[in-house]
Image (cartoon, rainbow, N blue to C red):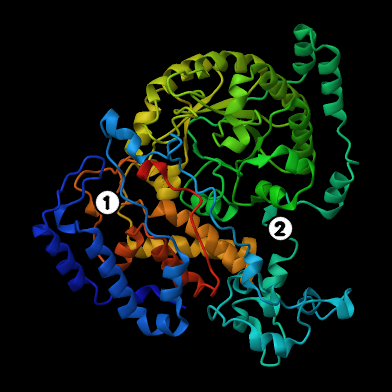
Amino acid sequence: MFQREDWGKGSEGVMETAASDTAGSGRDVAVKGEAAIKPEFLTTKEKFHGFVDSEWQGSKGEQASDNGTVEETKEACVEEPEAKKLKLDPEERTKGWKQDGKRLRGQNKSRPHTKPTTYDEKRLCLSVIQANRECPFGDKCHFYHDVAEYMSSKPADIGESCYLYDTFGKCAYGLSCRFAKAHTTPDFKTMENTDLVKACEGKNPVKNSLSKDLQNCLRKRSVSFKKSAEYLKTLSNNRDNKQQQGNVCFSVSMFKVDFRDKLYLAPLTTCGNLPFRRVCKRFGADITCGEMAMCTNLLQGQQSEWALLKRHESEDLFGVQVEGCFPDTMTRCAELINNNTDVDFVDINSGCPIDLVYKKGGGCGLMTRTRKFEQIVKGMNYVLDVPLTVKIRTGVQEKSNIAHKLIPEMKNWGVSMITLHGRSREQRYTKLADWDYITTCSKLASPVPLFGNGDILSYEDAMKARETGVSGIMIARGALIKPWIFTEIKESRHWDISSSERLDILRDFTNFGLEHWGSDTRGVEKTRTFMLEWLSFMCRYIPVGLLERVPQKINERPPYYMGRNYLESLMASQNVGDWVRISEMLLGPVPKNFNFLPKHKANAYK
């Protein structure tokens, strides 16, 4: 396993040389759209990658070449994206567009999708892992039953200690664990720490798992939705009588939420997983919310969708976010969540901009379908025993804001809180969030709390946002770039966090990921994939000590620069292969057939 201490040694002299070489390279210190970095740290693309590659092979060359990981990683990963283009004159603007005239968007839609199961050529049968019980498939089973044979073909262990064994006293993955040496005897028996096992007995740190009984009932459509039926029947009978419909929906009490001045970690698709939320909780996030879940998938009992509702015991103020476009499915989904999960609030996603959701009428599409939106809100409120919140954007089109028209209506529908992202669907992340418009909407929303969202990357940004009169702030990309932003805001300071501290954060994420997804090969590679998705954002962070002007702005891209040690430089790389190298420091070498392309192209940096 790679050790953090190896990376700082012998780097300082090379770093100084590489940085000093840029002084006479003719590179502009200040470039439009780039963050202002002290001149002594600036470098060029060629020198940066030359240094990172030579130092990696110098300090880990023998080990890397033995495993073939450096060469394979380069082949498996795509090239670094081009530097961000400056704004062009109108006649030149179309040069960067596709032939059909559509602008390039920020998502890799055709990226290769490799399931974690691909990396396990042949696994150990579950019957062997679980105390040698009899295999129900007998001779037809495709997995290993001979432990010695399996251990001879199993990939090498990643490390000497197993986080699950050290934390809980036993590892549920037994011999298939990639850290099995820590809890396996010479004759391939799995050990247990009886004291730790006894201390953890009866404790379940994760809630809201989907039970087999509930899954079977959902698949057979035998779950009762009594309250939803009441609401939907009234909705059908009084389709043309809004007054009667309203009386039914408001027969329940209105919920008040006390979220004022709390820091809200946004529900983030892909990256906002449970291990990442645990990291943010450690740094001071007050409110957390699960990733967006599709209501139809939840109603069908899909295990992967229900996993998005899971809640860790550290999440003391937790909600789930659901997406849908019809009153019947959204109301039933709300009742399902209300009766089978432990949450503090439910959030409706009416801000998702992606085509798959929008074209069906969900996400941002709800903002233009106000009658359906009203029916959904009232129906969900009718069946829920917890507050219902809504997340919206300024509107659909870039220069046609509609949130200010919608907010007064939403107050009458009974929402407990509104979160407003200061951008339209069309705008995405190409321009700054409109905090003046958020201020206007905050006044319209009163007394319903309104949280503002957009472009917060420092405590100064947070202070300016609070001055607008919003009830609180939601942080999304800022938390992905620097999860310690919550600490900075609460302590009103700029934290010049070291590269070793940042690696420790990734180590915590690794441990939480192994606990959440598993410590076998499948779990290790799933943890790696989510770490790489996160690193595609985290690499944009520029250390405070390198900035000529503090704080860093979220819309400013980092130029090529050398860090104060090798690890800091490696973490600054926007090359996918270097992110893989960081993952190998914590999760060992990637498999031979490994492939990765980040989900987001990061439109703000193209």
Q: Left or right of 472: which side holds 41?
A: left
Residue 37: percent from left, percent from top: 21, 50
Give the quadrant of the C terminus: top left
Answer few, some or many: residues within 10 Å of disc 1's Cα (few below 14, many 20 plus, some between 14 and 19): some
Circles 2 and 1: CB atoms closer than 8 Å: no
Q: Left or right of 137: which side holds 522?
A: left
Q: Which tag, 2 or 1, sits closer to the chain's start? A: 2
Residue with the mark numbered 2:
204
Residue with the mark numbered 1:
544
The answer to which of 400 and 224 lies nearer the viewer is 400
Identify which residue is drawn at 42% across, 46% down: 602
Residue 563: percent from left, percent from top: 26, 61
Identify which residue is drawn at 12% across, 63% down: 20
Q: Left or right of 331: which side holds 43?
A: left
Above/below status of 187 relative to 43: below
**Mark 1: amino acid:** Val
Mark 2 lies on a secondary structure that is loop
Q: Left or right of 147: which side holds 270?
A: left
Tell me the tag on residue 405. none
Answer few, some or many: residues within 10 Å of disc 2's Cα (few below 14, many 20 plus, some between 14 and 19): few
- Any part of residue 575 in sight: yes
Residue 274: percent from left, percent from top: 59, 52
Residue 182: percent from left, percent from top: 60, 82
The answer to which of 225 and 207 lies nearer the viewer is 225
The answer to which of 489 and 555 lies nearer the viewer is 555
**Mark 2: amino acid:** Asn
